Image: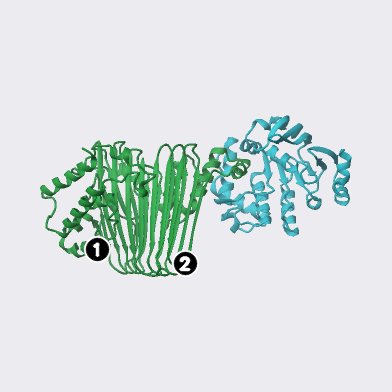
Chain colours: A cyan, B green
């Protein structure tokens, strides 16, 4: 589904990603771990199309479509979704109105009619229940004054509404207490099926107890230096990242 | 002949033609006003209060000064300019002349009628003597000009203890039958103790001919009265407006004046609040969304001259292309006005490369036990918010519009008439060139 070949990217003159190769197939869960500053968030931003970063070399395709040619919204229409590490507050736009707009824009781009109001409401009810969201958050301004945990839950709610092919969860566990973590992970697991894929970006193994990966990759200094099964995450948890750094040198 | 000279001679013509009752007190007021205007002339950029707004391009036209006979228009052609979804009283003027056909007035328990009859009929003499031209700024030459020529407009006189069952719409149409016209509507609004009134005002040109409107409104809110006044400024691009609105408030009254400026060539809003009692609330809200070479100048004054009063001011602006904005917010807190709360906020987003804003908060505080604040921001669109929205599948154009819409939303939220709120939301969406898939 997702193929990344020899990806080099950075900000201005600074190279951050230095040759990433990664293949994610439908039905798989991949975890990307690594110490701070290794390029984890850059990778997710580049896949999502954040123009702050410049791609200098390599390619990213989703089901054969070149993502690098597409704007962030066009990527979303093709099924890319990124859950932000720091979701942006947008005063004046309610969560409901925001998600309605997003869904209808995606449908429009894919040649579908707008979703009827009652179907939209039904979907919103269903998915917010899945995330055990308090209904009042839906009518409040998007993320404004939400706690860290509420913001993350809202991200996964949006993911549930948009049903992406490829979901990238960027540090979704940060700011979550253990109960919220379980709810969010449970939500992700329920959305998981054989036709979609998830990339979990995380610093800690904690989230991976709940969203169990098929593959774990360790990112260091802009490259994937080690890949393995879910046991690799446990090893990192136990030994820390120092041995990886040594491995890389 | 300059416009100023033309106006002064027109005034003399008016006197000679016997159109004015030369022995009346009213005529003394007019004479004083035209004399002051003759001395003052139109404001120029040398005048500190007009530093950023030049009337030059507006004054160069050869305006017709006197309204001609009633030009009729069909309701169906202008329906969209009314808030027709709800019941309302209507005062409609066409080229400065009252249109009985499009209006819906009343004298049943209260007066919602014409300035021309209030100025003439003996039964209103006392009211006119007590209220007419009492709170206008005599240093304001355009207000003086309006006073000298004031013939027509809305006269709203609500005695005490009346909650109006429906809002009042004041609409001034300009048909374009004259090539260039100067209109000078004059409104007087008196709201008695405990009474509640909502007013929606609009100036609308129906052609691309040049029009300059020089409007003056006086609002008197007695004890515990509540008045909400909404100004829709979405006129044609050859239409300019100088609006001066003066508000006097007594104890525990609440008055809001809400200004929505989307259209027009040049708009100047002078808005002044005077407190004549305690526990008063004044609300000044505005949103300007401009493009091309449009210009809007919001000049506000709140004069706190009694203790325990609050004023809240919120003005937002979105400026595209080479449009220009001015915000001048003066708040004066007199020495006696202890326990004043005066809050002022002015936020601007500049989108156009050549767009500019001149923002000037002006706080003069002479009392020591007060809470006063002002916040002024000028920014651009938040890039991280843009990316966030795009990453959810919302295209750039829509994301931009949604963000701008959201930026102005807290001003729209203050509207107390639901149908009007929807209407303003739609006007904003139209101006931003976007179809919102929902109503806010």
| Residue farthest to the front, as pictured | B46
**B86 or A172, nearer to the observer:** A172
**A202 or A167, nearer to the observer:** A202
Question: Which label number is shown at residue B240?
Answer: none
Numbered disc 1: what chain?
Answer: B
Numbered disc 2: what chain?
Answer: B
Residue at x 67%, y 32% (from the top left corner) = A68
Residue assigned mark 2: B370
Residue B428 screen position, x and y as percent: 45, 45
Residue B103 can be seen in this image: no
Q: Residues within 10 Å of mark 2 (few under 14, many from 20)?
A: some
- Name the quadrant containing residue A69: top right
**B243 or A161, nearer to the observer:** B243
In primary-sequence order, the first of circles 1 and 2 is 1
Q: Residues within 10 Å of mark 1 (few under 14, many from 20)?
A: few
Residue at x 45%, y 44% (from the top left corner) = B357
Which quadrant holds the N terminus of chain A? top right
Label 1: which secondary element: loop
Query: Is residue B112 left or right of A101 when viewed as pictured?
Result: left
Residue at x 76%, y 45% (from the top left corner) = A200
Which quadrant holds the C terminus of chain A? top right
Question: Which label number is shown at residue B108?
Answer: 1
């Amino acid at each position: 589904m997702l193929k990344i070949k020899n990806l080099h990217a950075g900000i201005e003159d600074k190279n951050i990603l230095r040759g990433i190769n990664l293949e994610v197939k439908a039905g798989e869960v991949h975890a990307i771990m690594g110490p701070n500053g290794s390029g984890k968030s850059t990778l997710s931003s580049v896949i999502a199309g954040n123009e702050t970063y410049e791609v200098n070399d390599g390619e990213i395709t989703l089901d054969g479509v070149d993502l690098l040619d597409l704007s962030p919204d066009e990527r979303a229409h093709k099924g890319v979704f990124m859950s932000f590490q720091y979701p942006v507050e947008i005063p004046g736009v309610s969560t409901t109105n925001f998600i309605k707009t997003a869904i209808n824009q995606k449908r429009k781009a894919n040649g579908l009619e707008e979703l009827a109001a009652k179907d939209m409401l039904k979907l919103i009810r269903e998915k917010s229940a899945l995330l055990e969201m308090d209904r009042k958050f839906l009518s409040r301004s998007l993320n404004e004054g939400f706690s860290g945990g509420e913001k993350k839950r809202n991200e996964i709610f949006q993911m549930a509404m948009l049903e992406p092919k490829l979901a990238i969860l960027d540090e979704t566990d940060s700011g979550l207490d253990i109960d919220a973590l379980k709810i969010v992970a449970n939500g992700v697991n329920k959305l998981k099926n054989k036709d979609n894929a998830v990339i979990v970006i995380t610093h800690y193994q904690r989230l991976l107890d709940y969203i169990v990966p098929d593959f774990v990759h360790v990112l260091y200094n802009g490259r994937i230096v080690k890949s393995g099964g879910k046991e690799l995450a446990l090893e990192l948890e136990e030994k820390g990242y120092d041995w990886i750094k040594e491995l890389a040198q | 002949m300059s416009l100023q000279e033309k106006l002064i001679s027109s005034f003399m013509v008016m006197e000679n033609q016997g159109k004015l009752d030369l022995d009346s007190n009213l005529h003394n007021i007019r004479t004083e006003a035209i004399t002051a205007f003759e001395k003052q002339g139109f404001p120029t950029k040398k005048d500190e209060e007009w530093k950023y707004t030049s009337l030059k391009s507006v004054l160069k036209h050869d305006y017709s000064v006197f309204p001609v006979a009633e030009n009729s228009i069909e309701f169906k052609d202008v329906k969209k300019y009314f808030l027709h979804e709800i019941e309302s009283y209507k005062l409609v003027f066409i080229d400065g002349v009252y249109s009985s056909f499009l209006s819906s007035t009343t004298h049943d328990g209260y007066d919602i009628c014409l300035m021309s009859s209030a100025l003439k009929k003996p039964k209103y003499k006392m009211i006119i003597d007590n209220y007419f031209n009492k709170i206008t700024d005599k240093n304001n030459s355009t207000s003086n000009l309006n006073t000298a020529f004031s013939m027509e407009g809305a006269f709203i006189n609500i005695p005490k203890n009346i909650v109006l069952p429906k809002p009042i719409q004041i609409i001034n149409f300009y048909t374009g039958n004259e090539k260039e016209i100067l209109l000078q509507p004059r409104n007087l609004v008196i709201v008695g103790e405990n009474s509640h009134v909502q007013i929606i005002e609009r100036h609308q040109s129906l052609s691309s001919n040049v029009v300059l409107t020089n409007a003056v409104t006086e609002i008197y809110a007695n004890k515990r009265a509540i008045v909400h006044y909404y100004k829709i400024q979405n006129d044609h691009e050859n239409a300019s407006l100088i609006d001066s609105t003066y508000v006097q408030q007594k104890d525990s009254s609440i008055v809001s004046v809400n200004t929505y400026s989307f259209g027009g060539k040049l708009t100047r809003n002078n808005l002044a609040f005077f407190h004549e009692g305690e526990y008063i609330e004044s609300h000044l809200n505005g949103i300007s969304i401009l493009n091309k070479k449009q210009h809007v100048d919001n000049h506000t004054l709140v004069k706190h001259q009694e203790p325990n009063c609050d004023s809240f001011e919120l003005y937002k602006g979105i400026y595209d292309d080479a449009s220009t904005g001015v915000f001048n917010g003066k708040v004066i807190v007199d020495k006696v006005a202890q326990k004043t709360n005066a809050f002022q906020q002015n936020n601007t987003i500049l989108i156009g490369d050549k767009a500019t804003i001149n923002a000037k908060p002006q706080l003069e505080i002479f009392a020591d036990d007060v809470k006063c604040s002002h916040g002024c921001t000028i920014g651009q669109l938040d890039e991280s918010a843009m990316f966030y929205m795009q990453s959810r599948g919302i295209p750039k154009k829509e994301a931009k519009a949604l963000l701008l819409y959201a930026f102005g939303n807290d001003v729209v939220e203050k509207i107390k008439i639901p149908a009007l709120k929807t209407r303003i939301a739609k006007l904003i969406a139209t101006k931003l060139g976007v179809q919102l898939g929902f109503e806010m």
